[in-house]
Image (tube, rainbow, N blue to C red):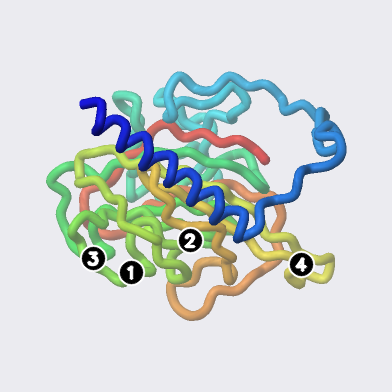
C-alpha cells in the first residue's frame, strides 16, 4: 500500500515538473504590470428586471402579446378588424378563414418568445402539414414581410429552406429540433430590423438569431430582403412594423399558439 502510494506521488511530481518545463519552453505569459482597476467598468449599471417564473413566462420588462386570455393586442392583417382566431383553454388556434393576424403595436428591434403546437394526429405532407409562420416585420397584406417558418417538420420531408426554423427560402435551420405533433414547440428569436436611407436604399440589412426548443437554429443570419414565395428576396423601405402570424391556406388541421411576449431592444 505504502509503496504504491509513494509511486503514485512520484509519478505526479514528475508529471507536474514536465508540464512546468513544457510551459516555460513555450513561453509563459509575462508578469502583469499596472492596476487591474484601469480596465474595470462600473457604469452604466444594467437595469434590474425580474425574470419570468420559468423560461416560458415573460420577464418584468416584456410586452405581453398573448397571455392565453384574449387577442386584444392583435388585428386582422387584411382590414385591421379584431383578430378572428379562436381563443380557448389558454391557447389561440389559427382560424384559416380569418386570415393572417398581426400586432396592433409596431416594433423595430426585439427579443421575441412564442410557443406553437401542431395538433396530434395532424395530416398532410410537405408544406401542407401544420404550415404557419411568424413574420418579424409585417410590411403589408398577405405574406408581406420576413418569415421564420412554422411547419410540422417531424418526419415530414420538404425543401430544407422551407422547413420549420428556416428563414423561408433564405436560410436552412442549423438543426431540426422538432418535437412531434401534439407537443409544444418554443421559438426564441432576436430580430434586428433593417435600416434604410432617406432615398429608400438599404443602409444595413436585417439580422435574425433564433432558437427552437432551446437549440440554436439561426445564428445572426443576414437577411437578403423580404420573403418571396417566388423569385429572389429584396428590400423595400419600411419603418417600425407589426409582428404577424400566418394563416396558411393548406387543408391540414390548424395549429395553436401560446405565451407570446417580446422585449424591445
Ligand atoms: Mg409558412
Residue that numbered label 4 is attached to: 203
Label 1 and label 2: CA atoms lie apart by 20 Å
Name which quarter of the figure residue 104 lies in.
top right
Residue 84 appears in view: no
Q: Position of residue 167 (x, y in %)?
A: 46, 62
Name which quarter of the figure residue 94 lies in.
top left
Residue that numbered label 3 is attached to: 126
Residue 185 appears in view: yes
Label 4 and label 1: CA atoms lie apart by 30 Å
Mark found first going from the N terminus, 3 or 2: 3
Using a 10 Å C-alpha cutoff, classify the residue at mark 3 as few (fewer than 14 neighbours), some (14 to 19) or many (20 or more). Answer: some
Q: In the image, is residue 24 above or below residue 3?
A: below
Residue that numbered label 1 is attached to: 160
Mark 2 and ligand 1: say if the CB distance to the nearest ligand atom is below 8 Å: yes
Mark found first going from the N terminus, 4 or 2: 2
Mark found first going from the N terminus, 3 or 4: 3
Q: Position of residue 145 (x, y in %)?
A: 55, 60
Please report the residue visible at 60 percent of the width from the left and 74 percent of the height from the top. Answer: 234
Q: In the image, is residue 90 above or below residue 241?
A: above
Label of residue 143 in the image: 2
The quadrant of the rendering that contains the N terminus is top left
Q: Position of residue 165 (x, y in %)?
A: 39, 56
Comparing labels 3 and 2, the label whose residue is closer to the camera: 3
Label 3 and label 4: CA atoms lie apart by 36 Å
Mark found first going from the N terminus, 1 or 2: 2
Please report the residue visible at 23 percent of the width from the left and 57 percent of the height from the top. Answer: 129
Mark found first going from the N terminus, 4 or 1: 1
Mark 4 and ligand 1: say if the CB distance to the nearest ligand atom is below 8 Å: no
Q: Residue furthest front?
A: 3
Say which of 141 and 123 sits in front: 123
Label 1 and label 3: CA atoms lie apart by 10 Å
Amino acid at each position: 500500500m505504502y509503496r504504491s502510494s509513494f509511486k503514485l506521488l512520484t509519478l505526479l511530481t514528475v508529471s507536474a515538473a514536465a508540464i512546468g518545463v513544457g510551459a516555460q519552453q513555450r513561453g509563459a505569459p509575462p508578469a502583469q504590470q499596472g492596476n487591474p482597476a484601469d480596465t474595470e467598468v462600473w457604469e452604466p449599471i444594467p437595469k434590474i428586471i425580474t425574470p419570468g417564473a420559468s423560461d416560458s413566462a415573460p420577464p418584468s420588462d416584456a410586452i405581453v402579446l398573448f397571455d392565453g386570455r384574449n387577442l386584444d393586442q392583435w388585428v386582422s392583417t387584411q382590414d385591421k378588424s379584431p383578430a378572428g382566431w379562436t381563443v380557448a383553454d389558454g391557447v389561440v388556434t389559427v382560424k384559416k378563414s380569418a386570415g393572417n393576424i398581426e400586432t396592433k403595436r409596431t416594433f423595430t428591434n426585439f427579443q421575441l418568445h412564442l410557443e406553437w403546437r401542431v395538433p396530434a394526429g395532424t395530416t398532410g405532407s410537405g408544406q401542407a402539414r401544420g404550415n404557419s409562420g411568424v413574420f418579424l416585420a409585417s410590411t403589408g397584406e398577405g405574406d408581406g414581410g420576413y418569415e421564420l417558418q412554422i411547419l410540422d417538420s417531424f418526419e415530414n420531408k420538404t425543401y430544407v429552406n422551407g422547413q420549420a426554423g428556416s428563414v423561408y427560402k433564405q436560410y436552412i435551420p442549423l438543426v431540426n429540433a422538432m418535437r412531434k405533433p401534439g407537443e409544444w414547440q418554443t421559438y426564441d428569436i432576436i430580430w434586428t430590423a433593417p435600416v434604410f436611407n432617406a432615398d429608400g436604399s438599404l443602409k444595413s440589412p436585417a439580422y435574425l438569431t433564433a432558437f427552437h426548443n432551446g437549440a440554436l437554429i439561426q445564428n445572426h443570419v443576414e437577411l437578403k430582403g423580404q420573403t418571396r414565395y417566388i423569385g429572389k428576396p429584396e428590400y423595400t423601405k419600411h419603418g417600425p412594423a407589426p409582428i404577424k402570424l400566418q394563416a396558411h391556406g393548406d387543408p391540414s388541421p390548424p395549429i395553436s399558439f401560446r405565451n407570446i411576449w417580446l422585449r424591445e431592444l
